[in-house]
Image (spheres, rainbow, N blue to C red):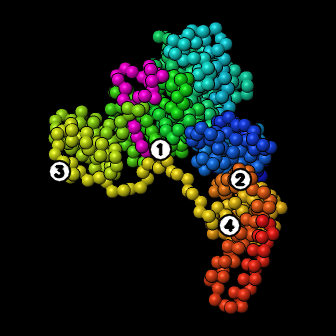
Amino acid sequence: MARIKDQSVRDVIAAADIVEVVGQRTALRRSSGTRYMGRCPFHDERSPSFSVNSDLGLYHCFGCGKGGDVVTFVRETEGLDFVAAIEWLAERFRVPLECEESSPLADEARRRRERLYAVLDQAAIFFERHLWEGPAGEQVRAYLAGRGIREEAARAFRLGLSPGEGLARKAREKGFTAQELRAAGLTNQRGNDYFPPRLMFPLADARGRVIGFQARKLRDDDPLRGKYVNSPEGELFKKSAVLYGLHLARPAIAKQDRAVVVEGNTDVIALHQTGFEPVVASMGTALTEAHLRELARLTRRLFLCFDADAAGEDATLRGMELAAGQGFDIRVVTLAPGQDPADAPDGFEARLGDAESYLHYRVRLEIERASDRQEAFVRAREILARAEDSPERQDALRLLADRLDLPRETLSGIAPARGRGGGPRELSQPRKLLDAGERLERDALAAVMAHGELVDGLAELSADHFDVELHRRMRFLLVERIDSTDADLVALRAELDARADREGITRRTGAELLLRLRERKLRRDLQAEEDLARTTELQAHLAKVRQALTELA
């Protein structure tokens, strides 16, 4: 993959309006000058503690501690890596990207993919127009209304109608080739439209780019056999990697630290339009490695909501076990036969409250599947022996004991697995409280950020005046007037900026803080010094610093 030039990265960051980007996730109110405040989009809070500096392009939350620049924000909210976040911002703010020299083959592949994305987006627009503007769309719009899908939600998910013909001709008129249409899965071998008249669900990648379609049958004389038919698998579309609705659910998944996986596209839409947003569909497939990679960027808490038959299928169970093995906290919501989440979307949150832990669900299922008491015990023991000790495991053990009427000594023989690491992440980690020395260093750096004229005073201090390595690195950047894309330094820079504003750190206060760092270093040196002459010299320096502090007071 070609590397984006550093200058292009700088151009994107300079062009990106952080207030506009953050404003899509939470309402911001100007507090003063270039400073905005709002409720944090990363955690629930009543009082706004989320600070944005539009001039420096930085944000920081005093509640949860998250902070950084506009690239960090996009990475956090969209679940993207650095390169993808730069591409996302470049597309949003129309900044052309230049890449380092790459091979002709790599350039050709990149251009081909861009053309495929473009033709698929044009196809989505074509289908949308036929649904909302064409005469044939009236009946389909009535069908959607009958399913409880409102126009606003249908438009948000870009639902459309394939007329069965005309797409290939329109695309060729726009300059797309027959080869491109075939590679995008929009035409068949004869060059005709691939999809007959059907309700179209665009399938998008993590960035919201259309990569294919799922088409629902509308008529009995439909030439395609399946009720739902997907685009042919190709360079962009691979069914096992797609989670329907993920591009719209990402912000809610990240903020609520949970994702709900359902089976069908209409379930996602029905729940979304009730205001329940952290939901995606696996499109009838079990959880795969690709699904889990996408979800792991946002959360480790998964609620799986399938009908009774699907939840017990071996493929679904293997997907659950795969997720549990990767440290996901799995909860299972089993629906009655023939029932979908869309049947009662308004009460869906209550269903999640009754969800079973993965271990409880698996043990219950194995007991119900077994032909006798002995087989049930063996099956359940195999599941429990692979699990580490946890409250969920203890709950599953109690279920096994109650169902099979087992004595306590029998259960004690089912030893838990040893810790393997990679377990569920801590769901709530309190922010580290700064000690006095660390706070002194951070406040001094915040003062220098807020008052550039203090840089010379900071330059007179060495790295040894700072105990925290990250602070030493920040001192170097401030003295040398260098920007960095290092995530830790960007986050610290954002915190220092917000801290200086909230604490009202003045230039005079900053000068005092720098003197305090000098004083601390001199006192430490005196304690360690054994040479009399050197001790006398240090005491003289300390007296001067204390005099300067007195004059500032």
The numbered mark at residue 472 is 4
Q: Earlier in the sequence, mark 3 or mark 2?
A: 3
Residue 322: x percent and y percent?
Answer: 40, 44
**Alpha-carbon distance for marks 2 and 1?**
36 Å
Q: Please say if the residues under marks 2 and 1 sit with CB atoms less than 8 Å apart.
A: no
Between tags 2 and 1, which lies in front? 2
Which of these two is toward me, 307 or 222? 307
Residue 22: x percent and y percent?
Answer: 68, 39
Residue 308: x percent and y percent?
Answer: 34, 27
Between tags 3 and 1, which lies in front? 3
Residue 344 falls within the magenta-colored stretch? yes
Q: Give the residues drawn in magenta, as a range.
A: 328-351
Which residue does the image show at 64% across and 47% down from the upper left?
A: 61
Q: Please say if the residues under marks 3 and 1 sit with CB atoms less than 8 Å apart.
A: no
Question: Considering only vertical position in the picture, is 160 above or below 121?
Answer: above
Residue 512: x percent and y percent?
Answer: 76, 65
Q: Residue furthest bottom?
A: 532
Kind of residue at badge 4: Arg
The numbered mark at residue 409 is 3
Kind of residue at badge 2: Glu
Instruction: Identify the residue under disc 1.
Output: 300
Q: Secondary structure at mark 1?
A: loop
**Alpha-carbon distance for marks 4 and 1?**
34 Å
**Alpha-carbon distance for marks 3 and 1?**
34 Å
Kind of residue at badge 1: Arg
Between tags 3 and 2, which lies in front? 2
Image side of residue 417 versus residue 139, left or right: left
Q: Earlier in the sequence, mark 3 or mark 4?
A: 3
**Alpha-carbon distance for marks 3 and 2?**
61 Å
Instruction: Identify the residue under disc 2.
Output: 503
Q: Is residue 479 visible?
A: no
Q: Secondary structure at mark 3?
A: helix
